[in-house]
Image (tube, grey):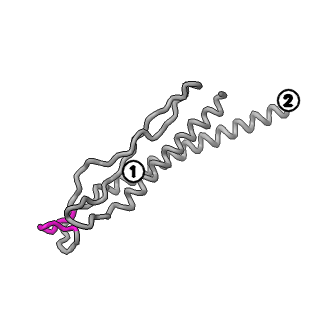
Amino acid sequence: MDPLTTSLRVAASGLTAQSERLRVVAENMANAQSTANSAQEAPYTRKTISFGSLVDRQSGVSFVSVASRSTDPAEFPTEYMPGHQAADENGYVKMPNVNMLVEMADMREANRSYEANLQTIKQARELISMTIDLLRSQS
């Protein structure tokens, strides 16, 4: 496999992984204020994603992949809302363990990684196109 095609495949695996990461971040942000329906239930739990690498034995190249999806074990913060349906006997409601600052930073990092992989694909396509043009002019 030629290096340009390999770079396209590596960057495409990065795009796929970062888009999955962005989906998880978006879900966390959308549910940042989702409480439970009763005091006995848990509110929305922040989701996390871990990356791993897959090695293509034929080419010896490593590709990024989503290794696992899990939930954040952090405790749920509580807010005093005595009239809420999910309030306990003391009037406290468990809130999701989603920190919007962390999610925004994660979103920004995933977006930058996505853009870097996209730029790699653009550069590889441009090099492939230039190679084809050079081969045509030599014929």
The residue lying at 25 percent from left, 49 percent from top is: 74
The residue lying at 36 percent from left, 61 percent from top is: 31
Report the front residue among 4 and 24: 24
Q: Which residue is mark 1?
A: 105
**Which quadrant of the figure contains the N terminus?**
top right
- Is 22 inside the magenta-drawn segment? no
Residue 43 place in picture, x, y as percent: 27, 60
| Three-letter residue code for mark 1 | Ala
Dot 2 alpha-carbon crowd within 10 angstroms: few under 14, some 14 to 19, many 20 or more = few
| Three-letter residue code for mark 2 | Gln
Along the polypeptide, which appears first: circle 2 or circle 1?
1
In the picture, measured across the screen, residue 132 lies left or right of residue 49, that is right
Residue 66 location, quadrant: top left
Determine the main secondary structure of the stretch shown in magenta. Answer: loop
Report the front residue among 89 and 97: 89
Q: Which residue is mark 2?
A: 138
**Is residue 94 depicted above or below 132 in this figure?**
below
Q: Are marks 2 and 1 in contact (CB under 8 Å)?
A: no
Report the front residue among 12 and 41: 41
Q: Which contiguous range is marked in magenta?
A: 86-93
Residue 95 place in picture, x, y as percent: 25, 61
- Judging from the image, what secondary structure is the residue with disc 1 in? helix
Residue 139 place in picture, x, y as percent: 87, 30
Residue 22 place in picture, x, y as percent: 46, 51
Residue 116 location, quadrant: top right
In the picture, measured across the screen, residue 104 lies left or right of residue 119, that is left
Residue 127 location, quadrant: top right
- Is 92 inside the magenta-drawn segment? yes
In the orientation shown, which residue stands out farthest toward the right?
139
In the picture, measured across the screen, residue 51 lies left or right of residue 61, that is left
**Is residue 6 depicted above or below 107 in this figure?**
above
